[in-house]
Amino acid sequence: MHIMEGFLPLHWAAFWWAIAVPCVGLGVYRLRQALSADREALPLLGVTGGFIFILSSLKLPSVTGSCSHPTGTGLSAVCFGPFVTSVICTIVLLFQSLFLAHGGLSTLGANIVSMGVAGPLAGWAIYRALKDTPVGMYLTVFLASSLADIVTYVVTSLELALAYPAEVGGIASSFTVFLAIFAVTQVPLAIVEGVVLALVFKYIVALKPGILLRLRVFPEEKIRAAGGAA
């Protein structure tokens, strides 16, 4: 998924940077608020960031000029919100572009928007819609994580289509082609990612329910019903 260095025309690279910067700036503000309120959130922040780094480093062959992989952003979006997740993703994407030849600096803004902003926003939206309903916590985390993954690739397809519209059919035709090629590998990956992150969340509920209660990730009664709090 990471768009490689130099693949986007300069004006499109600048456009996505212009969207990414204020989102990350808001994320820094929200992150400082969260850590000021509870420093004990740091270990959970480290866990969610670790999964983003590990899962998004698993490159699988996909469309020319890009690749396919899980994103790992859904768990962070559920626990800390989409904009804090954008900060974590920025750090991960910067490290991957500098040391793993995965992504690029000129395309970093586009990669932040797709993986660090759009995907987490979608995952967070479905989490917020289901959080206070009878839908179970683990199913909610599964759906949020899977949707965050899929939407990341939808937005990446749009970024590529805008930069390289087809001669016949324009942006819509190019978007369809990119999306179709990504979807073949991404749909099963998104399902697996949702299962993995739901299991990780179940482990956190069992091991450290207190931090989830203080962050108000889910209603207390749901966490207690899951056996996550005495």
Image: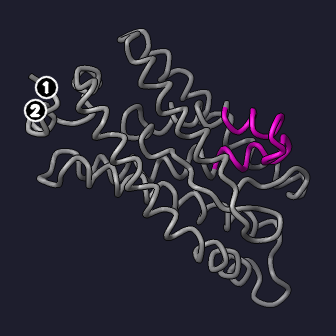
Cβ atoms under marks 1 and 2 closer than 8 Å: yes
**Residue 14 in view (yes/no):** no
Looking at the figure, which quarter contains the N terminus?
bottom right
Which segment did they paint magenta?
Answer: 92-113
The picture quadrant where one finds residue 224 is: top left
Looking at the figure, which quarter contains the C terminus?
top left
**Dominant secondary structure of the residues highlighted in magenta in the image:** helix
Secondary structure category for the residue under label 1: loop
Residue lying at 77% horizontally and 55% vertically, measured from the top left: 3
Label 1 and label 2: CA atoms lie apart by 5 Å
Q: Tell me residue 18's x, y (percent).
A: 73, 41
Residue 98 part of the magenta-drawn span: yes
Please tell me the numbered disc located at residue 12. Answer: none
Instruction: Please name the residue that numbered disc 1 is placed on.
Output: 229
* Amino acid carrying mark 1 in the image: Ala
Q: Indicate left or right for 10 with 155 as reference.
A: right
Instruction: Please name the residue that numbered disc 2 is placed on.
Output: 224
Q: Tell me residue 170's x, y (percent).
A: 77, 82
Out of 93 and 111, give the one closest to the viewer.
93
Residue lying at 13% horizontally and 39% vertically, measured from the top left: 226
- Please say if 112 is above or below 143: above
The picture quadrant where one finds residue 143 is: bottom left
Residue lying at 27% horizontally and 26% vertically, measured from the top left: 207
Secondary structure category for the residue under label 2: helix
